[in-house]
Image (cartoon, grey):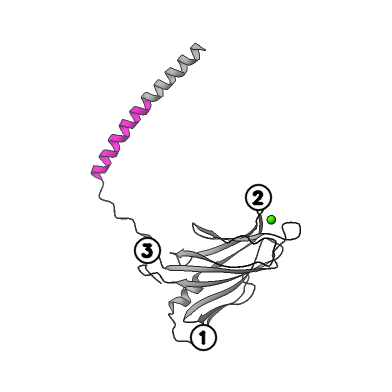
Amino acid sequence: MGETNARSNSHKHWRFGTNSQQNIQLRSRSSSNSRSSSPESPPKSLMENLMGLLRVRIKRGVNLAVRDVRSSDPYVVIKMGKQKLKTRVIKRDVNPEWNEDLTLSVVDPHASVSLTIYDHDTFSKDDKMGDAEFEILPFIEALKMNVTGLPNGTVVKRIQQSRDNYLADESRITYINGKLVQDMILRLRNVECGELEIQLNWIDLPGSKGL
Ligand SMILES: [Ca+2]
């Protein structure tokens, strides 16, 4: 017992000695660095890079997969880069109507948004109910055209359904009440069934880089 204590004590002392030596070395190294380095340029603020806000309205799910006995408790998680947002859970409904707005900060017009639907479970891990993805570029490009004064309901741009996108039907960018909106019906993948209806809106932010 005594032997073990003595050994561990000496071990501690030895480590302590090494650490304090390292600290001194680090301190002297960092002080010489601070003398020699040129003043750093200020970090670019978010506002300088921000194009605006993309408001993703999660409207509804249609014919979603059953993950409980007869139904599911679905919610949607959207991700763009490091941003992650989710809707509320709707209990026991495979045709849920969220009509919920999730707002993303847009820095990169070439970014894509991924959406995953989960079934909320109280006592086990939430089950996946499929996923989808869309590019924001077509909407950004339409916004950049800066259209004004069109009759309400004018379709400005159509994006066809293809093998490369998740569209279940043609997506339209429409001029409504002086603003552009993009409607999409996304066919979920990695699941047996289900579609997700969403709408994109744009919010300009004063002080940001803009479009
Ligand atoms: Ca559930």
**Ligand 1 rendered quadrant:** bottom right
> Disc 1 on helix, strand or loop?
loop
Seen in the image, is 151 located left or right of residue 21? Answer: right
Residue underneath mark 1: 152
Q: Residue at x 73, y 61 (%)?
A: 71
Residue 189 coordinates in the image, percent (x, y): 66, 63
Label 1: how many Cα within 10 Å (few below 14, some 14–19, many 20+): few
Residue 54: image tag:
none
Question: Which callout, 3 or 1, points to the residue nearer the camera?
Answer: 1
- Is residue 124 or residue 161 the one in the foreground? 124
**Spatial distance from mark 3 to mark 2, Cα to Cα?**
38 Å
State whether residue 178 is above or below residue 8.
Answer: below
Question: On the picture, is 154 further left or further right than 108?
Answer: right
Q: Which residue is mark 2?
A: 125
Amino acid type at mark 1 = Asn
In primary-sequence order, the first of circles 3 and 1 is 3
